[in-house]
């Protein structure tokens, strides 16, 4: 393929003509990877912190109801 082939340009073929092309999918995946908030370990830590907070709240309510 020739680089200056108009619609059949090698770069356009690689990048695709729509947003669902392999190139655009890879670009979106790369940007997601760069975003640290999308990492699974960050999500687990946030979920764990929320679970700990909920457990503490239940404990406080239980202690208050026993008194």
Image (cartoon, grey):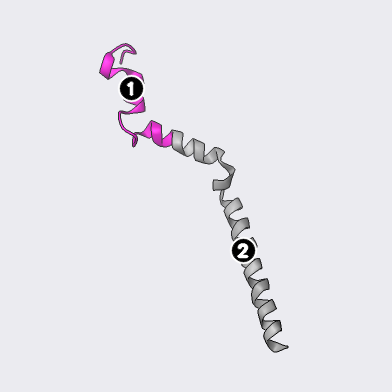
Between 61 and 19, which is closer to the camera in this rendering?
A: 61
Q: On residue 34, which mark appears? A: none
In the image, which residues are magenta? Answer: 1-26
- Residue at (53, 40) in percent of width and height: 33
Mark 1 is surrounded, within 10 Å at the Cα level, by few (under 14), some (14 to 19) or many (20 or more) other residues, namely: few
Q: Quadrant of residue 49?
A: bottom right
- Residue at (45, 33) in percent of width and height: 27
Residue contact between numbered discs 2 and 1, judged by CB atoms under 8 Å: no
Assign the C terminus to one quadrant of the image. bottom right
Q: Tell me where residue 17 appears, x and y as whole percent.
A: 30, 28
Q: Tell me where residue 15 appears, x and y as whole percent.
A: 36, 27
Between 20 and 55, which is closer to the camera in this rendering?
A: 55
Q: Is residue 3 left or right of residue 66?
A: left
- Residue at (50, 36) in percent of width and height: 30
Helix, strand or loop at disc 2?
Answer: helix
Q: Which tag, 2 or 1, sits closer to the chain's start?
A: 1
Q: Quadrant of residue 61?
A: bottom right
1, above or below 17, in the image = above
Q: Residue furthest right?
A: 67
Q: Tell me where residue 1 appears, x and y as whole percent.
A: 30, 16
Please name which of the two marks, 2 or 1, marks the residue nearer to the observer.
2
Between 66 and 29, which is closer to the camera in this rendering?
A: 66
Q: Quadrant of residue 43?
A: bottom right
- Residue at (35, 25) in percent of width and height: 14
Mark 2 is surrounded, within 10 Å at the Cα level, by few (under 14), some (14 to 19) or many (20 or more) other residues, namely: few
In the image, is residue 21 part of the stretch drawn in magenta? yes
Dot 2 corresponds to which residue?
A: 50
15, above or below 20, in the image = above
Helix, strand or loop at disc 1?
Answer: helix
Dot 1 corresponds to which residue?
A: 12
In the image, is residue 11 part of the stretch drawn in magenta? yes
Q: Residue furthest left?
A: 7
């Amino acid at each position: 393929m020739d680089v200056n082939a108009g619609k059949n340009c090698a770069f356009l073929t690689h990048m695709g003509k729509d947003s669902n092309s392999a190139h655009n999918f890879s670009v979106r995946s790369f940007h997601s990877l760069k975003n640290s908030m999308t990492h699974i370990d960050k999500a687990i830590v946030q979920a764990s912190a929320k679970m700990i907070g909920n457990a503490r709240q239940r404990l406080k309510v239980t202690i208050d109801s026993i008194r």
